[in-house]
Amino acid sequence: ETGVTQSPTHLIKTRGQQVTLRCSSQSGHNTVSWYQQALGQGPQFIFQYYREEENGRGNFPPRFSGLQFPNYSSELNVNALELDDSALYLCASTGGLAGGDTQYFGPGTRLTVL
Amino acid sequence: GESVGLHLPTLSVQEGDNSIINCAYSNSASDYFIWYKQESGKGPQFIIDIRSNMDKRQGQRVTVLLNKTVKHLSLQIAATQPGDSAVYFCAETLRSGGYNKLIFGAGTRLAVHP
């Protein structure tokens, strides 16, 4: 186990709703990245948070937003859900004295949009 | 473009055989590469990494080879076991503007038969 936890495990929403996913980073890691993994594909980078600020973003629209808290945990918020948002959402933590470059992933949250 | 691709989408091997999973990457500036294993319903699990100043790195039953000339990575698994059955991803670390993100390919499914 990596020590990265995510909640909830599964979630079902309908189109147009909003969702918040949560991630707790591994102890000592100060950077959290979020990825979206569609079925049968590799994870796609959404954004990265460091010191409570977004410091990098992939090709995702503004309705994907996030937060990082002083304890380095993080949230991913998605507004106006679309059917194509159905995916496994992964967070990965890294950085700090303990983390270096390697990103360690949590178990993911499976989001289904109906 | 940014991409990490895999040559073989599915690899079937007999238990006890050696497995080789290949991967091509596209960014010559990438300096850090990771192999992840993902079992059904779980997040990617770190297997082994390699930096661009190396061409080979060995772990327990796994070896990663890096050929920067042709931008190619491979993962070798010795004495493959049923527990090795999973999807394997290589990931390339792309650094930009103070953050780093992982670029994944679609993955290779490894099926180990008794």
Image (cartoon, coloured by chain):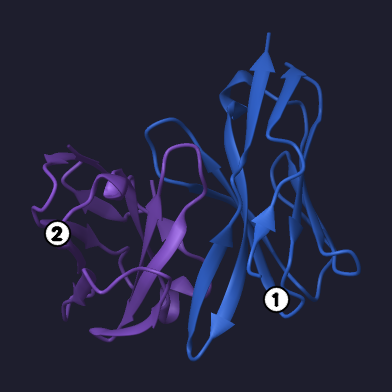
Chain colours: A purple, B blue
Q: Is residue B106 above or below residue B26?
A: above
Question: Of tags 1 and 2, which is closer to the observer?
Answer: 2
Q: Is residue A108 visible?
A: no
Determine the chain carrying the residue at label 2: A
Give x and y (percent) for residue B13: 75, 20
- Work out whether residue A71 or residue B3 is closer to the camera in this orientation and state it: B3
Mark 1 crowd level (few <14, some 14–19, many ≥20, 10 Å Cα): some
At a point 16% along the width and 45% down the height, the residue shown is A8
Q: CA distance from mark 1 to mark 2?
A: 37 Å
Determine the chain carrying the residue at label 1: B
Q: Is residue B4 above or below residue A86?
A: below
Give x and y (percent) for residue A56: 40, 81
Give x and y (percent) for residue A29: 35, 72
Circle 1: element type: loop
Q: Amino acid at mark 2?
A: Ala
Q: Are marks 1 and 2 on the same chain?
A: no
Q: Which residue is mark 2?
A: A80
Q: Which residue is mark 1?
A: B31
Give x and y (percent) for residue B33: 66, 64
Say left or right for A85 vs B47: left
At a point 59% along the width and 26% down the height, the residue shown is B85
Q: What is the quadrant of residue A95 in the picture?
A: bottom left
- Work out whether residue A39 or residue B18 is closer to the camera in this orientation and state it: A39
Q: What is the quadrant of residue A81 in the picture?
A: bottom left
Quadrant (top left, top right, bottom left, bottom right) of the N terminus of chain B: bottom right
At a point 23% along the width and 61% down the height, the residue shown is A24
Q: Is residue B112 above or below residue B73?
A: above
